[in-house]
Image: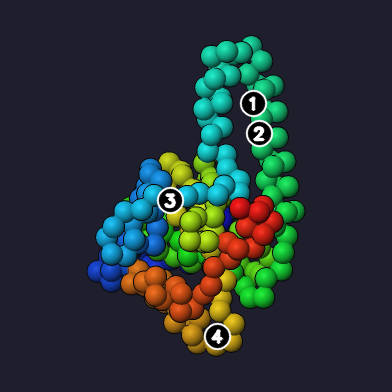
Amino acid sequence: MNTKNVNVPRRDTSSGGTIEKGSGIFPDPGTDKIHNLTGGITMETKNIIWSNYGLNLILNRIDKEDSENKDILMECMYNRNAEFLENARKDLFKILPENIIAIADLGLWDGRRSGYKDLDNNLASVLDPCEDYDTFYVDQNGDVRHESIHHDGTNYILYRQWRPDLSDEQKDRFRAKILSGKYTRRDINRYTVRIGQYVADVYEF
């Protein structure tokens, strides 16, 4: 998800408008573990949709083994991975019954802040990498997530579909909870539903 137009609260730390790492909604940075709401730890299964996270490892290997052709190989590698992304977007081109909301835990230079971004109802719209290292995946609970690593920290984005028959007032109430940083998993389930099953139908996992 491109974070350029993400809605975030004003910078008022007295309002409690941030969400702590490992709150039960987002995984701990730098691990494959996720905290559940009771404080326990469970191993997270990631069904990868697309990622550019491992490219730096390949670059290091190219630099050591074939430095003379590094530029050519790098271009081929990035072009090929871009093709994979476009193929994934084609695979996931599916119109959902309701629009998607991206719920974000952003790692910014001045700390972590929660925010949201409204997307359309095309499943492929979630595949919008924007940082140095991006990974899109479906977790063990059937949620579509995006982990985005950049120079200031890591962004964790959860993609959900609005529940049908919600009023605009109800949606605004949930958006306000996100901005306050005081929303819970119960709130997420009350206003939205998972979309990972649509991805699983395509890739059969």
Amino acid of disc 1: Met
Between marks 4 and 1 in the image, the one whose residue lies nearer the viewer: 4
Residue 198 visible? The answer is yes
As measured in the structure, the alpha-carbon distance from the residue carrying label 2 to the one carrying label 1 is 6 Å
Image disc number at residue 78: 2
Between marks 3 and 1 in the image, the one whose residue lies nearer the viewer: 3
Between marks 4 and 2 in the image, the one whose residue lies nearer the viewer: 4
Circle nearer the N terminus (2, 3):
3
With 166 as the anchor, is 86 left or right in this view?
Answer: right
Q: Please report the residue visible at 58 percent of the width from the left and 65 percent of the height from the top.
A: 195
Residue 19, relative to residue 187: is it above or below? above
Give the class, few, some or many, for how many residues have Cα within 10 Å of label 4's Cα (few <14, many ≥20). Answer: few
Give the class, few, some or many, for how many residues have Cα within 10 Å of label 1's Cα (few <14, many ≥20). Answer: some
With 172 as the anchor, is 20 left or right in this view?
Answer: left
Circle nearer the N terminus (3, 1):
3
Image disc number at residue 166: 4
Between marks 2 and 3 in the image, the one whose residue lies nearer the viewer: 3
Q: Please report the residue visible at 59 percent of the width from the left and 82 percent of the height from the top.
A: 164
**Label 3 secondary element:** loop
As measured in the structure, the alpha-carbon distance from the residue carrying label 4 to the one carrying label 3 is 31 Å
According to the picture, the residue beneath numbered tag 3 turns out to be 44
**Label 2 secondary element:** helix
